[in-house]
Image (tube, rainbow, N blue to C red):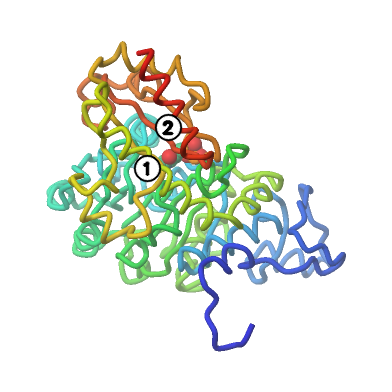
Amino acid sequence: MSEERTPGFDTLAIHAGAQPDASTGARATPIYQTTSFVFDDVDHAAALFNLETFGNIYTRIMNPTQAVLEERMAALEGGTAALAVASGHAAQAVVLHTLMEPGAEFVAGRQLYGGSINQFGEAFKKFDWHVKWADTTNAESFRAAITPKTKAIFVESVANPGGIITDIEAVAAVAKEAGVPLIVDNTLATPYLLKPKDYGADIIVHSLTKYLGGHGNSIGGMIVDCGTFDWMASGRYPSISAPCESYHGMVLGETFGNFAFAIAARVLGLRDLGPAISPMNAFLILTGIETLPLRMQRHCDNALAVAEWLTSHDKVSWVNYAGLPDNQFYQMARRYCPKGAGGVFTFGLKGGYEAGIALVGKVQLFSHLANIGDTRSLIIHPASTTHRQLADDARARAGAGDDVVRLSVGLEDVGDIIADLDQALEAV
Ligand SMILES: *Cc1c(COP(=O)(O)O)cnc(C)c1O
């Protein structure tokens, strides 16, 4: 490849971060299934532990298979560095561990993945971290929730399962004015459809479990440092801007500049909280990413066809897919993800809760389960499953009312997908 040519997205999805293995020539990235790595000598060991040289010590903190996955994701999102962790939830916990102190607050759009609502609202309370909820569809509501204790703003780019396309640029303006970083969960869009950094995100998190892995076989998470936030100027994030006791007083923000956040998340958050991804899962997810552009486009095309078909079905009261021209987020989708509005959407059944339960019991090609972003078509009735632990009003606000059915449209022949829904709806 010539020096001056910038590789395209599809090329990066296959090659970024990877080289034939230096010792064996293996073309696919090997699974470095080892806990630890031998030091060259005592000085080398000391330099590694002092963060004076980069290198592998122990797979909880860093591993060569994970490193390829990290470099690839940083390249696809346009970030300066990235950190792979055990799950999407681990990514969120490690990011906030790096930013928060006891008593601190962050503002999150309330239209989130159900598990994130629990993590933010319940689990994080035990760390004395407090979420203030805003309305994802209204950037002003984020401004209203900011206080002197606010350390970050968190949104999903495409909100699951409400079908919301977030006006990231408007929320980023609020974050900038407040002097706090904007964290964007880009799981549903993936960088193939939308790159949050282009609209002002400072940190991107992913559940790799979904479209990036893409085959429903591995749990993983990713943190991408966009390199855009000035931690030293802010001074409000001591993990990055204050002398670090466990590294002989090193100031990570001074030493590591525009990738200091990723380093802090690794050498403090991941090191001490411990949610490392296994080399095997990193390998499977890397393999998935190679075909991300092809898969993501087909997911979008199939989802649009299924959504259009459902629109005219007499047992369906509404279809909420931002790819449909009459959808309230259609213009936002055109602006933020013109290649397609993703593979997940919801629709309403005239028969309500009972019809929802009946439908998930009748499908055959679709799998009834709590995941999205698999090659296979997936279906769930959120009110009776993923969102059942929430109170009725919180459920409705999260876009998971009684009549709601969520589809994650897979890569099967679209005629077969529609035929399966047709027979199942017939029987409802
Ligand atoms: C699944 C998901 C998560 C959590 O990821 P895990 O890998 O299951 O921990 C977070 N955000 C979104 C949008 C998700 O879909």
Residue under the point 73% across and 57% down: 57
Q: Is residue 128 visible?
A: no
Residue under the point 47% across and 28% down: 370
From the viewer's side, name the closer residue of 421 and 340: 421
Q: Quadrant of the C terminus?
A: top left
Where is residue 30? Give x, y as percent: 77, 56
CB at mark 2 closer than 8 A to ligand 1?
no
Amino acid on which the number 2 mark rests in the picture:
Ile
From the viewer's side, name the closer residue of 166 and 98: 166
Q: Is residue 111 visible?
A: yes
Kindly indicate the quadrant of the structure image that contains residue 427: top left
Label 2 residue SS:
helix
Q: Quadrant of the N terminus?
A: bottom right
Amino acid on which the number 1 mark rests in the picture:
Ala
User: Quick check: marks 2 and 1 in contact, CB under 8 Å?
Assistant: yes
- Separation (CA) of disc 2 from disc 1: 9 Å
Q: Which residue is mark 2?
A: 418
Residue count near mark 2 (Cα–Cα under 10 Å), binned few <14, some 14–19, many ≥20: some
Label 1 residue SS:
helix
Q: Which residue is mark 1?
A: 305
Where is residue 123? Give x, y as percent: 40, 31
The answer to whether residue 104 is above or below residue 245 is above
